[in-house]
Amino acid sequence: MTLGTTGISTTLVANTIGVGSNDAGTLCTSDKINKWSKWKPIRYNTLTGITLPQLTSTLYGLTIPSYTSLSLIIVAINDGVTWEYAKPQGGDSLEYYRSGDFRNYEHTATKPFSDFICPTIGFNNSPSSTISATLIFTQDGGTYEIGLNDLIGIKDCYFAIYMIRTDGNTLSSRLLTAENTVGSGGADITISIHGMSLSDYYVYPFLCNIKNTDPSIIPSGFTLYGLDGLTRSILTIKDTPLDITIEAAWHNDTHDSNQIDYTVTIYNNSGSSIDLQTCFTTLRFVDNTFSDPIVQGETQTPRGVLTIPANGQYSFSDNDTAYFNDSPNGFTLWFSSTAPYSIVTSTMVAEVIIE
């Protein structure tokens, strides 16, 4: 509900914000005031109704926290960033209670930024491997609501992210910004992840007063602004979009069947199907590596081309002949492919699983 420009009575205000009082001081300091409304009571030394230039000069009564180091803004985001609303404190402080400040008040106004979008998985297997981070925000809030373009100083900042490994290692850390300021609609950051270490990363969103699109440097001399209510996300960087599980066990617990049963399941976490080339399963003595020559008592089975559907899985089961006494230390079941990903993975053959 938007209030008009005239007839702003204390009763109207009380009913609008849901306060059981007609006292101007109570209304102007109520926690039920929507701080995202452009028009509302603010701290200003005037007895007459507040004007748009006065609202603009005070950032619409908002206090936007700023930081001069990455460590400080990381702590702030982890604790939860809030843009505080500085309500008037009364005549003794020359911050008068003016019920007229509720002219054009919008009780259903929304925050000028609603979300921060970043993928949870990225694959660094190609020189062109990138991910995108996006800030969903309102550029121009119009007459009644606050947009980022309405905030002096903030509108000239850039949407930015800082990536750092979750173990605290700064290897492959990135501080990157959008190409354009938020006042010019800059909402997206393209991040090259080729060559980044395989790990989990925290991705912190904020605003930065300087532009940086070079992943090889972290600039200095910046001022960073936290975004109310937005928190970090976690990105896992992998070298392949495939996850492979292998289950292998003797057919019975006495091993006299001379048979090892196994199931290979391949999960595709990407949005495109993948044709794995030159696939093999290889049953080997546990003391031999994958690259050692095949010897008598070991088995290698060609699997050809395996097509793994987008965001799906492919699974196959089989068995190989094996003699327990040939390898007293046990057997290993390997799965391999050559393209588009060179994959070599294995599991040790377990004793029979009795269900």
Image (cartoon, rainbow, N blue to C red):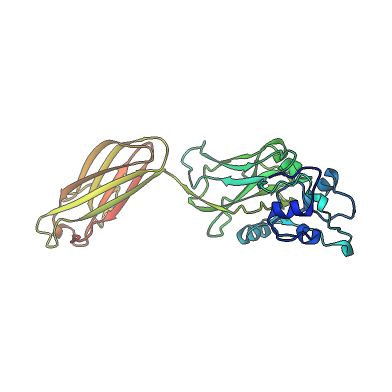
Quadrant of the rendering where the N terminus is positioned = top right
Q: Residue at x 51, y 38 (%)?
A: 129
Q: Position of residue 307 (x, y in %)?
A: 31, 35
Give the side of residue 343 with respect to residue 146, left or right.
left
Give the side of residue 355 with respect to residue 202, left or right.
left
Q: Position of residue 13 (x, y in %)?
A: 74, 52
Q: Residue at x 79, y 51 (%)?
A: 9
Q: Nearer the viewer, residue 241 or 301?
A: 241
Q: Position of residue 262 (x, y in %)?
A: 22, 50
Quadrant of the rendering where the C terminus is positioned = bottom left
From what the image shows, is residue 90 above or below residue 206? below
Q: Position of residue 109 (x, y in %)?
A: 67, 46
Q: Residue at x 22, y 62 (%)?
A: 329
Give the side of residue 72 with respect to residue 242, left or right.
right
Q: Nearer the viewer, residue 44 or 187?
A: 44
Give the side of residue 325 with respect to residue 191, left or right.
left
Query: How many numbered discs sit on the rendered protein?
Result: 0
* Residue 257 visible from this viewpoint: yes
From what the image shows, is residue 29 above or below residue 292? below
